[in-house]
Amino acid sequence: MSLLAQASDEAARYRAYGPRHIDDIAARYGLDDASRETVRLISMVLPFRVNEYVLEQLIDWQRLPDDPMYQLVFPQKGMLNTEDEKRLAVLADQRDAAAKRELRETVRDIRARLNPHPSGQMSLNKPSQNGVELPGLQHKYRETVLYFPGQGQTCHAYCTYCFRWAQFVGDADLKFSAPDPSGLITYLGEHPEINDVLVTGGDPMIMTTDRLRTHIEPLLGVDTLQTIRIGTKSVAYWPQRFTTDQDADDVLRLFEQVIASGKNLAVMAHFSHPRELSTDIARRAISRIKSTGALVYCQAPLIAHVNDDATAWRDMWKTELALGAVPYYMFVERDTGPHDYFKVPLAKAAGIFQEAYRQLPGLARTVRGPVMSATPGKVAVDGIQDTAEGRYFQLRMLQARNPALVGRPFRALYSDTAAWVDELELDPATDLDIAEAFLGSAAARLHSAGPAENTHS
Ligand SMILES: *Cc1c(COP(=O)(O)O)cnc(C)c1O
Ligand code: SF4
């Protein structure tokens, strides 16, 4: 019996499937040979992980290869360039040691060209104590610190667009994670201005409840802390985490305990497509989370082939509202991994956002976007402006390393193709402090990328 068939007998128990299960998956769902070969080759370079729930309930196998859930999780032709894919194909079938070595080198070389660490400036936001860096913390905005628990650095399935992909293929250091919250607790003691901890990953909900508790419970005694957020894709990829998993009830008790301590608990749920909200079990998961007093906020990046149409966002945001969750951020995808495959130009992104936003009831217009999480802060593209001097993107700082810049509008010259802030040119009349935040000088070009912070899950 195949590995998969065994697993399906106990569908409710989480088990990760990866590249070595692709033949079984192909046989079970009638994946054609070309698609199977694509997964086999591309998953040598990019991470691939799926599970029973995603396979059975989210992917529409009748709609391959365009199905958004299939695109979300399965590696696709076009994610690597044709020459690279050919090279992999030739090398992958050879058995001798020299070819195997060359294959490893090729994989490393392709990964290196996919901008695996869009994080050149990670050191900017890394707190330290007595000159020693505190692992697993990122402090970029005055009131919020990101916390990466060491055992939460993986996910129930992997998004093909994941900007933490290098970590999942073992390419990025896991120094980026904290073994326990002692460093965080000390840091919070020294920084009473922080009232918000965002526990993130990977996905913290991959941890057992007992493990998660060791990271959360110590925070409850920190008086200056008002809010604990948990960034997670689990409601989309494995809602069983909150319903039928062995410790699902325990996790709800933990959430209740957070609320009972007087703190706010927000589950920052990553939903990429309305289908993820369509299953009974996902809806039950949201309802159970909310029953603890926790709030559910929703966010996702805008991704070509997955959700680059206004109807998908409108339906998603409306459904979120109907389920009592709060639409929060639409992100612009970062420049890493198969970015050329997924990227959506800012002009198109702004159009999609506005078209969807216009059709929302007021209570769902809590959502903001499209937002770029760049070095100086979170930059929203508020729209396109036609003026006597020409066309501009109207931009706004939603978050900023420099708190004085929060809320400040500014603009950049319009471009049809720019897909990230570093491809934009600031309006020469931009305030000096905004221009400086982007470049560290008053020059007019915006500066690129930021830390590989996980803001959308
Ligand atoms: C987005 C983000 C936050 C949270 O910002 P909010 O606007 O409060 O949601 C915190 N830290 C980093 C690094 C972020 O990117
Ligand atoms: S985008 Fe988020 S949920 Fe998806 S694989 Fe990456 S870390 Fe996990």
Image: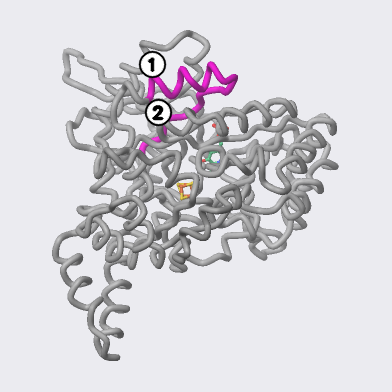
Q: Which residue is mark 2?
A: 380
The answer to which of 437 and 378 lies nearer the viewer is 378
Residue 329's spot in the image, x, y percent? 47, 29
Q: Secondary structure at mark 2?
A: strand
Q: Amino acid at mark 2?
A: Ala
Q: Is mark 2 within 8 Å of ligand 1?
A: no
Magenta stretch bounds: 313-332
Residue 381 belongs to the span the image colors magenta: no
Sequence-wise, the earlier of marks 2 and 1 is 1
| Left or right relative to 20: residue 288 | right
Residue 317's spot in the image, x, y percent? 45, 21
Give the residue furthest to the front: 1
The answer to which of 291 and 142 lies nearer the viewer is 291
Q: Which residue is mark 1?
A: 357
* Residue drawn 29% across the image and 51% down it: 30
* Residue drawn 82% across the image and 29% down it: 262
**Quarter of the image holding residue 437?**
top left
